[in-house]
Amino acid sequence: MKPLYWVGSSKKDLQSLPEDVQDVFGYALHLAQAGGKHAQAKPLKGFGGAGALEVVEDFFSDTYRAVYTVKFGDAVYVLHVFQKKSSSGVATPKPDMDKIRERLKAAESHARGA
């Protein structure tokens, strides 16, 4: 089982979501720790292949997303968990993409032991 690391406020953010959404994301992260991949996990565009994976869950009229990576060492890093509030279609909003990039760098530093 790979260790799970929470970057920034991702754990607190997950805990603030509806319980049904927490269950889906928790299971997806458990599968990632076991070396598998949730059926809803897809590569996040803009991060080169499977650099960052995203799980999207709709709950009533809201959409929630969890972004994680397994590309550093033998660990799972949870980068960002959030409710998508943008009305600009399905694309992940730029402030969230910036946060994911920043946290991906922090995860890489942690994996290197820096």
Image (cartoon, rainbow, N blue to C red):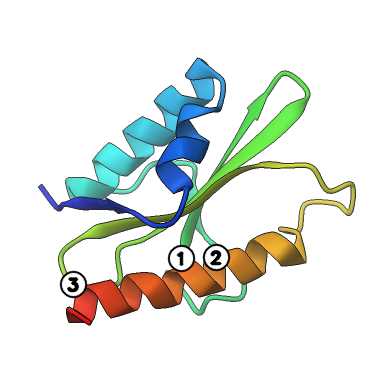
Residue 103: x %, y % from top left: 47, 67
- The residue shown at (22%, 82%) is 114
Numbered badge on residue 101: none
Q: Which mark is residue 100?
A: 2
SS state under label 1? loop
49, above or below 97, in the image: below
- Depth-wise, is mark 3 or mark 2 nearer the camera? 2
Q: Amino acid at mark 3?
A: Gly
Can I make out residue 38 in this image?
Answer: yes
Q: Is residue 46 left or right of residue 68?
A: right
Q: Comparing marks 1 and 2, which lies closer to the viewer?
A: 2
Q: Earlier in the sequence, mark 3 or mark 2?
A: 3
Q: Position of residue 54 (x, y in %)?
A: 51, 53
Question: Depth check: 91 or 93 in front?
Answer: 93
Q: Are marks 1 and 2 in contact (CB under 8 Å)?
A: yes
Circle 2 SS class: helix
Per the rendering, the mark at residue 73 is 3
Q: Earlier in the sequence, mark 1 or mark 3?
A: 1
